[in-house]
Amino acid sequence: MLSAFPEFTIVGECRNGDEVLAALDRLAPDVVFLDVQMPGVDGFEVIRRRTPDRMPAVVFLTAFDQFAIKAFEDQALDYLVKPVSEARFAATMKRLTRHLRGAVPASRAPAIIVTTSRGATVLPLQDIDWIEAADNYARLWTGGRSYLIRESLHQLDASVRPHGFARAHRRALVRLGGVRELIASRSGGVVAVLGDGRKIPISRRRRAAFAAALRRGLL
């Protein structure tokens, strides 16, 4: 796939995390395509030992889609899930080129990678309206469309809560920045009205915490 981008040259290949750390010192590359699971030292441990500030641009290339949020928290530029289509790879290379030319800010918005029939799609958390439980999966809603990921709502809760999400009820997480208003329902409950008009009920036991989180976000 890289052969289609002659402006990039492969300067080294590594079989495990220890070799990656040695190669970073020896070769000083501008970009590293990094797997998550490797013998011995994994991809995240490579970044931890090297420290994010001393890492080149990182693109994770892996078969595991469940580590996407952690990858972006560790300042990865992109996260590719195998098998990678030529179109998805080309989009990454375009983004990478812009980054190396200084057109992309150093900070990256946290995101979730979802696998579709066309390949992998990056969903920035700021574009997700709400997340609902679907047995051992979770369904992400954005702009009226939904994506199913192989991760439970409980697992997602800890990852997305620092980025402006709050639990509405046992089976729903809501992005606070997308809440248009809180209104009383006819049954005496409270619902959060999202930007697209969807109404998410707020359970009685979570009502005070949800309202407080919403107020903090507005300050």
Image (tube, grey):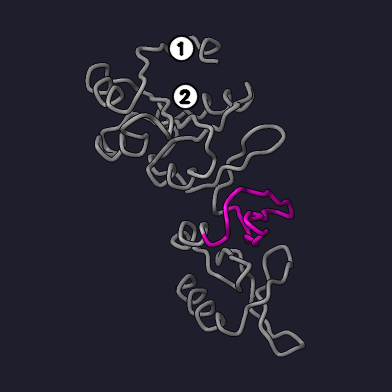
Q: Secondary structure at mark 1?
A: loop
* Amino acid at pointer 2: Thr
| N-term mark: 1 or 2 | 1
Residue in view at x 50 percent, y 35 percent? 79
Question: Would you name the residue on which mark 2 appears?
Answer: 97
Q: Quadrant of residue 82?
A: top right
The range drawn in magenta is: 127-154
Amino acid type of the residue that numbered disc 1 sits on in the rendered structure:
Glu
Does residue 135 show up magenta in the picture? yes
The count of marks equals: 2
- Residue 15 picture location, percent across and down: 36, 20
Label annotation for residue 7: 1
Q: Which quarter of the rendered picture does the C terminus lie within?
A: bottom left
Gap between marks 1 and 2, in whole Å? 9 Å
Which residue is at 55% across, 70% downward?
A: 167
Image height of 95 relative to 66, above or below: above
> How far across and how far down the image is residue 123, in percent?
59, 46
